[in-house]
Image (cartoon, helix red, strand yellow):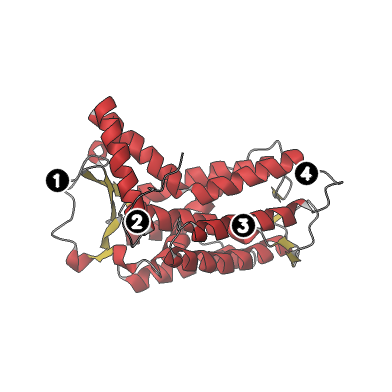
Amino acid sequence: MTLEADHIPAPRTPGRSTREIEKAVGVWTRSHMPGWLSEFVVFVLKLGWASLFGGLMLIGLVVTKIFWTEATPIPRYDAMLIYAVAVQALFLYFRLETWDEARVIVLFHLSGTVMEIFKVYVGSWSYPDPGVIRLYDVPLFTGFMYAAVGSFMARAIRLFDMRFEPYPPFWVTLLLATAIYVNFFSHHFLADIRIVLFAATFLVFGRTWVKFHIGDNDYWMPMVLAGGLISVLLWIAENIGTSTETWLYRGQNAFDMVSLAKMGSWYLLIYVSFATVTLVFRQALIPRRDARATRPPRARPKEALQPAAD
């Protein structure tokens, strides 16, 4: 089964083909399911489609762990690099990803690889398997693991037609993202200010809502809640990575669960990731001065995921 439409008039773009598919899936689900259930099914399918790159990377980790041995001619990490490059090329060839999204992925490669080199150097985690294509003991496929996060965010913004409003001043979000990123390095030598940074995320983004589209309805979710939910998913994915012994934290073995504290680290990294994505996808941001007409009503917690008022 493919999620790309077969007969769409030119020009064919990922956004248009996805909308055609969503319409077809929506028609089918509404005719076979209650309204709330059909929209939930579409939501899950779009979420899975947005995370396709990351899902394929996790499948690669599991498959190479199962089938790779010391007798395999290509080291496991090098095979993962070849696999990741091939997946990325296929995404672009079949237009599953736009060139703007590819630009985001390059930014994630750069920032992620720099962090990997530093963290491996200071002993935060390590890559135990052999590999030829390394940079300062870091297998180069790891950049694609960070890129998978960027791919998910960029594709989700497009697939769900997301808008972020009221969005804080752009320079403030970049300053916060920079402070978070720098703290991941500096806390090895200076005071760890992540508690301050946690508070700053609520201060900066506490009023920001994520507006997303499913079927015929718009829904709203607080941005800090969205960041928390994504961090949980990334923590689960990281447990898959360590269980396959692709990387291991200091003192960890494959049967140990990743510390829950890492969920907090991922929560902070979400804001670095989002700032990186918005360097390319500025059109999804609605500044506070322009958001009054579309701002959601003051919702009680149970209303946070209800359709927005027409």
Name the element at disc 4: loop
Specify whether residue 281 is in view: yes
Residue 127 location, quadrant:
bottom right
Residue 103: give x, y in percent of width and height.
48, 68
Distance Cα–Cα, label 2 vs label 4: 38 Å
Disc number placed over residue 200 in the picture, else none: none
Between disc 3 and disc 4, whose residue precedes?
Answer: 4
Name the N-terminal-most of marks 2 and 4: 2
Q: Residue at x 70, y 48 (%)?
A: 246
Q: How far apart are marks 1 and 2 (CA)?
A: 25 Å
User: Along the line of sight, which residue is nearer the eye, 10 or 20?
Assistant: 10
Residue 150 placement, left or right of 258? left
Residue pictured at 23% horizontal, 31% vertical: 35
Report which residue position mark 1 lands on.
309
- Where residue 63 sits, quadrant-wise, is top right
Please tell me which of labels 1 and 2 falls first in the chain: 2
Tell me the crowding category of disc 2: few under 14, some 14 to 19, or many 20 or more residues within 10 angstroms, Cα based.
Answer: some
Badge 1 marks a residue whose secondary structure is loop
Identify residue type, mark 4: Trp
Secondary structure, mark 3, is: helix
Callout 3: 10 Å neighbours few (<14), some, many (20+)? Answer: few
Q: What residue type is labelled 2?
A: Gly
Q: Residue 68 carries which label?
A: 4
Q: Are marks 4 and 1 in contact (CB under 8 Å)?
A: no
